[in-house]
Image: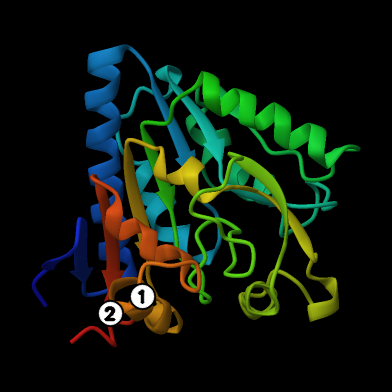
Amino acid sequence: MKTIELNKDKLTIKIFENADMLGKAAAAAVSEKLKTVVAENGFANLILATGASQFQFLEHLQQHAIDWKKITVFHLDEYKGLPETHPASFRKYLKERILKKVQPEKVYYLNGDAADAEEEVAKYEALLKEHPIDIACIGIGENGHIAFNDPPVANFDDPKLVKVVELDEACRRQQLGEGWFPTLEDVPTHALTLTIPAIMNCKAISCVVPDERKAEAVYNTLNAKIETTCPATILRTHPDAVLYLDEGSATKIK
């Protein structure tokens, strides 16, 4: 299969044969953007996502000759009340899968089990304002969310950059289905997340979405009305966003 490139509104869509090819292509593109930004500014600010969809992308990204000592990393979200030692912790995920290996200049983690969650999100919002993000590497959930902005809490005009949200059942069932928790009752009901404006404020967005279980969300992202019933539809309005799909996630695209 040849790589297929499409456009929907302002969004570029690239379809690959499998998740590994998708991850490799996205990693190469993000690497080149990081190198360009570092060459121009002397530093770059990067957001990294987590979850099963990011496995291949992160594996390929760390193979590139990136000057990580000139890069500051943020992440998208974290479960509220979950310690970093938990297998589903996004802090644990990022450290083990990439950050301990590449050792960026600075990493700012969302502390999900902070004593005061509202104080934690306020601190993280201040950090984001100090570090305008050059590239956000994100995914799309089975319910169409970006970060933990599920349809019931998503707000395209959110006044906040970071907030505490309640997770909807579809989101929690996805986390269960991916094997991060033994039962639905074990999946946290709340999380700390970057908001949609925080993501859309990023200068470039790389959105990696493999797997056929994401096909419905991808279809809605590209075809539904741009509204919070499918939060990812907002990506179609970003001036520099690329959606990376494989044959599975692109199943419903005609």
For the point 23% across and 15% down, the residue is 40
Q: Identify which residue, 237 or 94, lies in the foreground.
A: 237
Q: Position of residue 107 (x, y in %)?
A: 58, 28
| CB atoms of marks 2 and 1 within 8 Å | yes
Residue 218 has which mark?
A: 1
Please tell me whether mark 2 or mark 1 is closer to you in this view.
1
Q: Quadrant of residue 161?
A: top right
Type of amino acid at the residue the image marks with label 2: Ala
Residue 250 has which mark?
A: 2
Classify the position of the C terminus by image quarter.
bottom left
Q: Position of residue 59 (x, y in %)?
A: 42, 51
Q: Is residue 193 left or right of residue 80?
A: left
For the point 30% across and 19% down, the residue is 38
Asked if one can make out residue 139 in the rendered structure from this viewpoint, the answer is yes
Q: Earlier in the sequence, mark 2 or mark 1?
A: 1
Q: Identify which residue, 228 or 235, lies in the foreground.
A: 228
For the point 81% across and 32% down, the residue is 119
